[in-house]
Image (cartoon, rainbow, N blue to C red):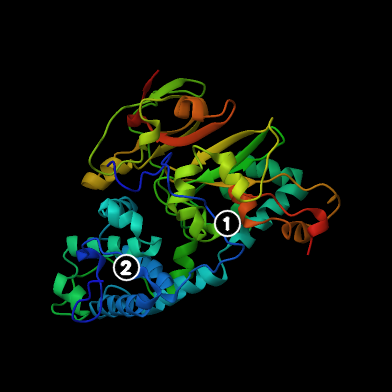
């Protein structure tokens, strides 16, 4: 690895040496990022308190439990379900979920005939207000390359096998429209409260790479 | 540009291998890089299309060999240098050598929660009536612009059906090249899997992309 005199390896002047990600260099990366943060703070560009607050928001508040509440309400309440599919933005805003990467939301309905699955082949577009930041696999070349050409093969890696008769619609998020998959409600959950239903809604079921938990698997 | 980020349909990246559980950030530096990026973006020197393009311009071998947040760091350093906000020496030493430029604004810690919840819409007033209607057959144009575009290679020259009209949105190609928002109509276009992939496709399955009017021609 190319080390400069201060132990940092800067991407902006890297020369194709990629060993920087090995565990032994983790400390170097941490130091380098800290140095950049200090520099930008000193220059009056960023407030470290904002950096802390952004991390805290995505580690502790904005995540897939938000989306699970939306899906559970769509399962439990037919009027809400209609609103969600007609215009997802105000329907989702009823929970107070809005903002960055959720400006143009559309809800996709999974049925026995159609299974929806979401990808961003060009980068990592994802509906932050309802799902938080995407998992590493969603942003990785294996998922981004294969979701569009081999969705069934990808689903098999998630342990999902769909009936032969179900058609798959893969949504490639190439503009600023963000998609939330509403999976099918599991059997045997009649009369359940929204809160109990929400516990069955997994993150992957809202991306379309998974199915909700079954009623028996309810925690 | 035909960059390393345009991954749809590529082979050889291996299985997706999703872990059962994973943290939002795998290392503390990833969270810092994410949040520093967002805080730096809030200064107003660049926008989302410039930020995406900065990552797309990372040399292909380096882009593909690097982790997601390493590429975010590389993209940010590139933007900071290109906008004259830091010098190469400052990046290498982590020390301020000259005072910073005045940013339009600085995101403060106390403002993060509110700003995160505030939608930034990409929809704009239409300058011209739209050319296509739902149900129409359209062909994605064959073109290979060297700048930023959101038209992936795997649909160029392929025919699909307009299934939704998403309004008139900021056009990433112009926005990135000249900062001109140049709003354009945005359509959801469904491509048959077999149209895109031939014998490797699957009858009945579809891939849907959100495509801007300049990407499309009547089929």
Mark-to-mark CA distance, 1 and 2? 35 Å
Q: How many marks?
A: 2
Q: Chain of mark 1?
A: A
**Considering only vertical position in the picture, is A169 above or below A217?**
above
Q: Chain of mark 2?
A: A
Q: x%, y% of residue B19? A: 58, 61
Q: Viewed as shown, does residue B168 lie left or right of B206?
A: left
Classify the position of the C terminus of chain A by image quarter: bottom right
Which quadrant would residue A129 be assigned to in this image? Answer: bottom right
**Considering only vertical position in the picture, is A99 above or below B160?**
below
Q: Are marks 1 and 2 in contact (CB under 8 Å)?
A: no
Between residue A204 and residue B37, name the one nearer to us: A204
The answer to whether residue A118 is seen in the rendering is: yes
Which residue is under mark 2? A19
- Give neighbour class at mark 1: few <14, some 14-19, many 20+ (Cα, 10 Å): many
Which residue is under mark 1? A130
């Amino acid at each position: 690895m190319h080390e400069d005199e201060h132990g940092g390896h800067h991407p902006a002047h890297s020369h194709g040496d990629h060993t920087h990600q090995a565990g032994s260099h983790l400390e170097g990366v941490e130091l380098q990022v800290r140095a950049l943060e200090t520099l930008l703070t000193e220059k009056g560009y960023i407030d470290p308190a904002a950096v802390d607050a952004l991390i805290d928001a995505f580690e502790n508040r904005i995540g897939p439990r938000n989306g699970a509440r939306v899906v559970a309400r769509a399962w439990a309440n037919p009027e809400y379900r209609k609103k969600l599919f007609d215009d997802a933005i105000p329907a989702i805003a009823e929970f107070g979920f809005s903002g960055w990467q959720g400006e143009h939301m559309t809800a996709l309905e999974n049925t026995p005939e159609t299974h929806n699955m979401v990808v961003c082949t060009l980068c990592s577009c994802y509906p932050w207000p309802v799902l938080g930041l995407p998992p590493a696999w969603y942003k990785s070349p294996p998922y981004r390359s294969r979701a569009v050409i081999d969705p069934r093969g990808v689903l098999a890696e998630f342990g999902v096998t769909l009936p032969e008769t179900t058609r798959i619609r893969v949504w490639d998020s190439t503009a600023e429209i963000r998609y939330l998959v509403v999976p099918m409600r599991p059997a045997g959950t009649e009369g359940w409260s929204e809160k109990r239903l929400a516990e069955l809604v997994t993150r992957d079921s809202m991306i379309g790479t998974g199915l909700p938990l079954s009623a028996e698997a309810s925690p | 540009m035909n960059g390393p980020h345009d991954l749809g349909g590529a082979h050889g990246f291996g299985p997706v291998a999703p872990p059962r559980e994973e943290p939002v950030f795998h290392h503390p530096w990833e969270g810092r890089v994410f949040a520093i990026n967002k805080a730096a973006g809030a200064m107003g020197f660049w926008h989302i299309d410039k930020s995406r393009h900065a990552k797309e311009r990372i040399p292909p071998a380096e882009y593909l060999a690097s982790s997601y947040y390493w590429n975010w760091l590389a993209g940010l350093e590139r933007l900071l240098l290109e906008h004259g906000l830091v010098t190469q020496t400052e990046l290498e030493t982590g020390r301020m050598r000259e005072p910073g430029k005045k940013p339009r604004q600085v995101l403060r810690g106390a403002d993060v929660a509110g700003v995160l919840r505030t939608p930034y819409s990409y929809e704009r007033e239409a300058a011209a009536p739209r050319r296509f209607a739902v149900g129409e057959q359209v062909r994605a144009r064959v073109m290979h612009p060297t700048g930023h575009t959101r038209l992936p290679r795997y649909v160029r020259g392929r025919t699909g059906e307009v299934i939704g009209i998403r309004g008139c949105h900021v056009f990433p190609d112009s926005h990135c090249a000249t900062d001109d928002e140049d709003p354009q109509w945005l359509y959801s276009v469904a491509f048959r899997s077999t149209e895109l992939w031939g014998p490797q496709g699957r009858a009945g399955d579809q891939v849907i992309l959100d495509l801007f009017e300049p990407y499309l021609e009547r089929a």
